[in-house]
Image (cartoon, grey):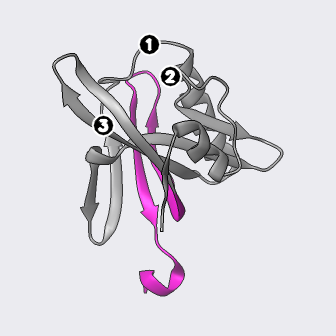
Amino acid sequence: MSRRCSRTKAFRNHGLKLKNARYSLSALCEEQRKVAISVWQDEFRVNQGRMIYERTTWGDWYDGPGRRDCFRHLRWAVEHRNGFVDVVICIRKWTEQGYVMIDSFARPGLVMRITRLDPSTGAFRLEQVLPAKQAA
């Protein structure tokens, strides 16, 4: 069962530390060969029993060091981990001022694989990797 917590703690639950708790979207630890990315819960969809997370543009991701680090981390995962990443799921709600993040949690055992990555447009796609028993 996943437990809700701060984003910082959710990344720690994956054994990773955010570079900056305010703007970091992802974390990388080369020594542990681990990468995790934060994603919006409401942007997941299911296709043939697998969770899919896909962004076709930068959308609501601001332009800054967090975004640049995120794509560097995703590129590292493609080059060194065959595209495998852990995820921190963030829950948001709509307010008059726009979206506000209200909660985060790590999902141990949920592994996603990068199947598309285009830093120039901000597009990427993550697909859930099912355990061998479930995939058969």
Residue plotted at (30% across, 72% down): 49
Q: Is 61 on the left or on the right of 37, as rendered? A: left
User: Secondary structure beneath disc 2?
Assistant: helix
Q: Amino acid at mark 1?
A: Asp
Decide: marks 1, 2 in contact (CB < 8 A)? yes
Earlier in the chain: of badge 3 and badge 1, it is: 1
- Determine the CA span between mark 1 and mark 2: 6 Å
Identify the mark nearer the N-term, 2 or 3. 2
- Give the labeled residue for mark 2: 67
Q: Give amino acid for label 3.
A: Arg
Compared to residue 118, the image places residue 65 above or below, namely above
Asked if 129 appears above or below 22 in the picture, the reply is below
Tell me if mark 1 has few (under 14), some (14-19) or many (20+) residues whose alpha carbon lies within 10 angstroms of its own. few
Determine the residue located farthest toward the top in the rendered image: 64
Residue underneath mark 1 = 63
Q: Which residues lie in the magenta part? A: 107-136
Q: Residue at x 50, y 12 (%)?
A: 64
Instruction: Read off the residue under disc 3.
Output: 92
Q: Label 2 vs label 3: CA separation?
A: 19 Å
